[in-house]
Structure formats: structure tokens, C-alpha cells
């Protein structure tokens, strides 16, 4: 059985990893000239990157935390498996509900997964450029 302390450490480790991949994406887009706002709490799901004039948002998801269907995402801790399985499926359900709410409000969302970024940064950048459209000289 995993102690609350161990569980807390696991969560922190996963969260700081999420922050790290988020920084990676932010740097990539910023270098291309895209301007964005961060973590707008007035939008459903508090999206990681918000492109207001384009009405588009980007979420950067850790594969474990958000239950991605990939090798990384399917790795569930061997202790407290039920706890983690339930928690992660709640997270995925909430993500889906968030995307629906954003869509209902007229916002488009794109997701960058940790594994995509680890595999091929260039492909992620191309995907996001297609999603966002051309860089404007004015900030959004
Ligand atoms: Zn993944």
C-alpha cells in the first residue's frame, strides 16, 4: 500500500513534468512569433495557451495524467492501481467535457501530448502551425 506521502510525491513529480513539457511548447511557439496568454481561468478547463483573437486554445497533456492511449499513458503505478485508474479516467472524462464546452462557446482546441513532443518536436510544431494559422504581426 502506498502512503499518502508517496502518493503526494508521485503527483508532484507528474505535475512538474507537465509544467516542463508546457514550457517546451511555449518556447517553440514563441520562437515562431506566436503570442498567447496563459491559463485563462475564465475559459473552461483553464487552457494552457490561449490565442484570443483566433479563438483557439492549446492544451498540453501529460500522457499518464490525462490517460493517453499510448505506451506511456497506459503505464499505471503498481501500487494503488484502482485509485490511479479511477483518477485518470475522471481526468479524461473532464477533458472531454471541457472540449465540448469550449466548442459550444465557439473556441477550437488542440492537444499536444507529451509522447508526441518527445518523439518529434518538428511534427508538433507543424501540427500547431496548421491549427493556429499564420503568425500575425499584431499580438493576439
Ligand atoms: Zn501519449
Image (tube, rainbow, N blue to C red):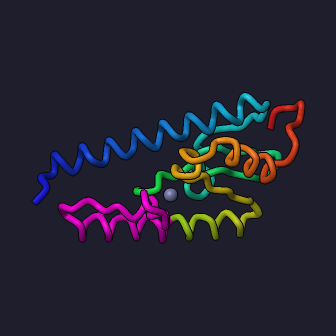
Tell me, yes or no, whether the highlighted magenta stretch contains residue 93: yes
- Which x, y percent locates residue 95? 53, 64
Q: Is residue 28 above or below residue 80?
A: above
- Side of 80 relative to 87 (left or right): left
Tell me, yes or no, whether the highlighted magenta stretch contains residue 111: no
Residue depicted at 25% across the width and 66% down the height? 83
Looking at the image, can residue 41 be seen? Answer: no
The N terminus lies in which quarter of the figure? bottom left
Looking at the image, can residue 63 be seen? Answer: yes
The C terminus lies in which quarter of the figure? top right
Extreme-front residue of the structure = 119
Residue in the foreground of this view, choosing between 118 and 27: 118
- Which x, y percent locates residue 10? 27, 47
Counting labels gives 0
- Which x, y percent locates residue 79? 18, 61
- Which x, y percent locates residue 13? 33, 42
Residue in the foreground of this view, choosing between 115 and 41: 115
Residue depicted at 71% across the width and 43% down the height? 125
- Side of 130 relative to 101 (left or right): right
Q: Is residue 76 above or below residue 140?
A: below
- Side of 93 relative to 8 (left or right): right
Q: Is residue 49 above or below residue 74?
A: above
Residue depicted at 31% across the width and 62% down the height? 76
Kindly indicate the quadrant of the structure image that contains residue 65.
bottom left
Magenta part of the protein: which range?
65-94
Residue depicted at 29% across the width and 64% down the height? 84
Amino acid at each position: 500500500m502506498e502512503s499518502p506521502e508517496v502518493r503526494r510525491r508521485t503527483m508532484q513529480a507528474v505535475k512538474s513534468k507537465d509544467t516542463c513539457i508546457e514550457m517546451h511548447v511555449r518556447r517553440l511557439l514563441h520562437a515562431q512569433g506566436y503570442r498567447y496568454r496563459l491559463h485563462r481561468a475564465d475559459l473552461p478547463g483553464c487552457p494552457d495557451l490561449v490565442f484570443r483573437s483566433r479563438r483557439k486554445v492549446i492544451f498540453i497533456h501529460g500522457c499518464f495524467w490525462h490517460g493517453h492511449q499510448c505506451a506511456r499513458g497506459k503505464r499505471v503505478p503498481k501500487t494503488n492501481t484502482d485509485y490511479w485508474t479511477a483518477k485518470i479516467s475522471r481526468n479524461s472524462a473532464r477533458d472531454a467535457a471541457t472540449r465540448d464546452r469550449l466548442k459550444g462557446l465557439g473556441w477550437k482546441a488542440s492537444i499536444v501530448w507529451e509522447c508526441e513532443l518527445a518523439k518529434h518536436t518538428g511534427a508538433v510544431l507543424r501540427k500547431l502551425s496548421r491549427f493556429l494559422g499564420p503568425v500575425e504581426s499584431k499580438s493576439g
